[in-house]
Image: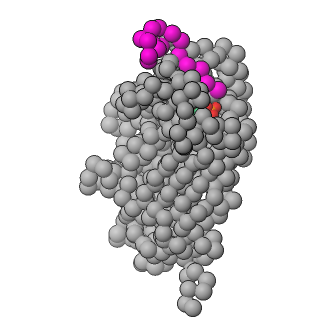
């Protein structure tokens, strides 16, 4: 990332989770209730374990925001862990005599960070590893991503997500068709948000819930895939110039960095393998304004840059590695074969992973927009985005003169106003 930096810290059962987001422009209004609402969304989902009933995640801002607007300094977010009350001894920061410590965890769970981490950090207690590997670390990512999403909204970009597959059950087999065009009205928030699985297809949702129940009964877990869509991106964000500034590479890396994600596709993704070029690339046709695309198989990026079409990112989520019917493992101390360690856990995390996916996409797109357009203030940024949108309105020869575009959201003008009292 070139402009925004996000550093997170915190153990799952430690005192709390911290996120520091650096690089936001000054003067950007931040709705902290919205941030808490996004944290709440991350905690919903059929198949979640008991931990989500214990926690009510809310972000305390300890730096970077004054009178509801960013200062341009790093924004620090703290999300307390309610469960810490019960773990303060087991997760004590201060030394605890060996006889008072709980029994170490020595049976690595296949699929978790346990085995590699125990060897890497040379510990006899896998808890030293699993606490940080926990998906709880996605909470501060969501809080920071929620702020990025608000910045994107000011720039005219909206992001949403849904679960499109769990096990073998696919939502709307043709909802996002091979042309990558979204048909019908199923994608609307009032269809997705109330769904316990973030699945807007009620028929598929019912079968997915039954699948979760079946896995729970059998001590098993289940994964799936989710899709994140970002609409309204200005054209030419990201870069064709260098491997690490390519927008698609950054999106793939950030989404792959979410716990349990094993695959990321943009647009057709692996669907390009079996198709010929004429069935992969998106034809450009005359339209309003200037031109249109017949399809969106590229998923909104070409040559490492946004091409103005919706950005469509799909991620494969593996089943949770903590199994009530554990797989074989080897005792780290004795080398003997035993069953893997069992912890309180979740049966399915797919709907929650989708919300984290939204926020990671928001973080990458906000970073790319800021890297492309710059700006010490939100006004600077929005003015530069507006110029780019005007420049994108059509072929050079028929473009409207610069300065006549009216394509930013209604509230963008408010955001661009100077901070109250700035003149004083
Ligand atoms: C997790 C195990 C569970 C999850 C946790 C991730 O926690 P616990 O061990 O306390 O039951 O609920 O995720 C969260 C706490 C969260 O907020 O997302 C794991 O092993 O990764």
Is 253 on the left or on the right of 420, as rendered?
Answer: left
Colour scheme in the image?
one colour
Residue 333 image-quadrant placement:
top left
Q: Which secondary structure class fits the magenta region best?
A: loop
Residue 337: in magenta span: yes
Q: Residue at x 66, y 58 (%)?
A: 34
Quarter of the rendering occupied by the N terminus: bottom left
Magenta-tinted stretch: 329-344
Q: Residue at x 59, y 29 (%)?
A: 100
User: 163 or 122, which lies in front?
Assistant: 122
Q: Residue at x 70, y 26 (%)?
A: 209
Q: Is residue 82 above or below residue 70?
A: above
Q: Is residue 382 above or below residue 326?
A: below
Is 212 on the left or on the right of 300, as rendered?
Answer: right
Q: Residue furthest bottom?
A: 424
x then y, percent, for residue 276 = 33, 32
x then y, percent, for residue 339 = 53, 12
């Amino acid at each position: 990332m070139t402009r925004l930096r996000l550093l997170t810290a915190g153990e799952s059962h430690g005192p709390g989770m911290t996120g520091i987001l650096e690089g936001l422009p000054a003067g950007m209004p931040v709705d902290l209730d919205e941030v808490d609402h996004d944290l709440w969304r991350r905690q919903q989902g059929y198949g979640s374990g008991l931990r989500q009933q214990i926690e009510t995640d809310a972000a305390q801002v300890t730096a970077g925001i004054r009178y509801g607007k960013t200062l341009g300094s790093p924004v620090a977010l703290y999300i307390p862990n309610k469960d810490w009350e019960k773990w303060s001894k087991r997760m004590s920061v201060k030394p605890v005599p060996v006889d008072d410590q709980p029994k170490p965890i020595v049976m690595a769970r296949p699929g978790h960070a346990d085995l590699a981490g125990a060897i890497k950090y040379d510990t006899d207690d896998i808890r030293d590893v699993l606490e940080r590997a926990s998906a709880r670390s996605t909470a501060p990512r969501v809080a920071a991503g929620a702020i990025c999403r608000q910045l994107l909204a000011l720039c005219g970009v909206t992001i949403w997500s849904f679960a499109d597959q769990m096990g073998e059950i696919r939502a709307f087999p043709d909802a996002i068709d091979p042309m990558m065009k979204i048909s019908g009205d199923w994608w609307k928030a009032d269809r997705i948000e109330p769904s316990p699985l973030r699945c807007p297809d009620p028929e598929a949702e019912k079968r997915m819930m039954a699948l979760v129940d079946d896995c729970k009964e059998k001590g098993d877990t289940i994964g799936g895939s989710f899709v994140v869509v970002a609409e309204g991106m200005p054209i030419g964000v990201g870069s064709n110039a260098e491997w690490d500034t390519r927008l698609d590479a950054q999106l793939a890396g950030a989404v792959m960095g979410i716990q349990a994600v094993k695959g990321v596709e943009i647009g057709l993704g692996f669907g390009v393998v079996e198709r010929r070029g004429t069935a992969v690339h998106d034809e450009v046709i005359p339209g309003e304004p200037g031109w249109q695309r017949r399809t969106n198989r590229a998923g909104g990026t070409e040559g490492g840059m946004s091409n103005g079409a919706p950005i469509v990112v799909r991620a494969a989520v593996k089943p949770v590695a903590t199994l009530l019917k554990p797989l074989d493992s080897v005792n780290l101390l004795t080398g003997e074969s035993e069953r893997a360690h069992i912890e309180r856990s979740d049966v399915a995390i797919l709907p929650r992973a989708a919300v984290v996916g939204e926020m990671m996409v928001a973080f990458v797109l906000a970073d790319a927009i800021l890297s492309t357009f710059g700006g010490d203030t939100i006004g600077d940024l929005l003015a530069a985005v507006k110029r780019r949108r005007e420049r994108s309105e059509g072929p050079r020869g028929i473009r409207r003169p610069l300065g006549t575009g009216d394509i930013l959201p209604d509230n963008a003008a408010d955001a661009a106003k100077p901070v109250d009292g700035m003149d004083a």
